[in-house]
Amino acid sequence: MPRRRPTDPAQMDLLAWQPEKVVRRFAAEMIRAASQAARLCRGLKVSLKECGMTRAQVAERMGAYLGEPVSEDVLNAYVGEAKAKHIINAVRLVAFIAATGDHRPLNALLDDLGLVVVEKRYLPWIEVGILREKRERIDRDIDFARRRATQGMLHD
């Protein structure tokens, strides 16, 4: 029996490959909460923890994006569930997403509506899928019409 060569650690395992996630979401248990506002706060908190920056750095980047100062205290208020009146507004949420690169908090808000945020680079592939579904529907209609036409011709 031939001897098996040792595998190169740099070589990828084809069976371990996973496709890239098109829609990035939080695991449900990470942001489970009684209200939308609390779910958003938890999502923001997770994003801050995972982004690799300090809160001060995120606040500074948000400020640069908005063209106005954003303090670390304000950012802390946004992630504090106890401060219900300090819910982040839409414009600042976009600045947060721009600063952290994480759009999962927005997906957490949209989930109840059946909507998701998808990167623009996927739009052509989504269009391909939609067109393919239309073509399959038309092909089924054509097949049905052809069967009817054939049956009609046989009965004449």
Image: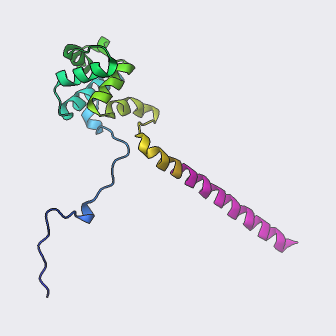
Depth check, front residue: 124 or 30: 124
Q: Residue at x 68, y 58 (%)?
A: 141
Q: Position of residue 133 (x, y in %)?
A: 57, 53
Q: Does 148 appear in magenta?
A: yes
Q: Position of residue 135 (x, y in %)?
A: 61, 56
Q: Residue at x 66, y 56 (%)?
A: 138
Residue occupying the far top of the picture: 85
Depth check, front residue: 15 or 81: 15
Question: How many marks are shown on the rendered structure?
Answer: 0
Q: Residue at x 74, y 66 (%)?
A: 146
Q: On the rendered structure, is 49 left or right of 150?
A: left
Depth check, front residue: 88 or 95: 95
Q: Is residue 5 above or below residue 20?
A: below
Q: On the rendered structure, is 42 left or right of 154?
A: left
The picture quadrant where one finds residue 43 is: top left
Q: Position of residue 26 (x, y in %)?
A: 29, 37
Q: Is residue 104 above or below residue 10?
A: above
The picture quadrant where one finds residue 19 is: bottom left
Prevalent SS, magenta region = helix
Q: Does 51 appear in magenta?
A: no
Q: Position of residue 132 (x, y in %)?
A: 56, 55
Depth check, front residue: 35 or 99: 99
Would residue 34 be seen by someone viewing this image from the given angle?
Answer: no
Q: On the rendered structure, is 130 left or right of 20?
A: right
Would residue 132 be seen by someone viewing this image from the given angle?
Answer: yes
Q: Which residues are magenta?
A: 129-156
State the quadrant of the N terminus: bottom left
Q: Residue at x 65, y 60 (%)?
A: 139
What's the image's color scheme?
rainbow
Q: Is residue 71 above or below residue 105?
A: above
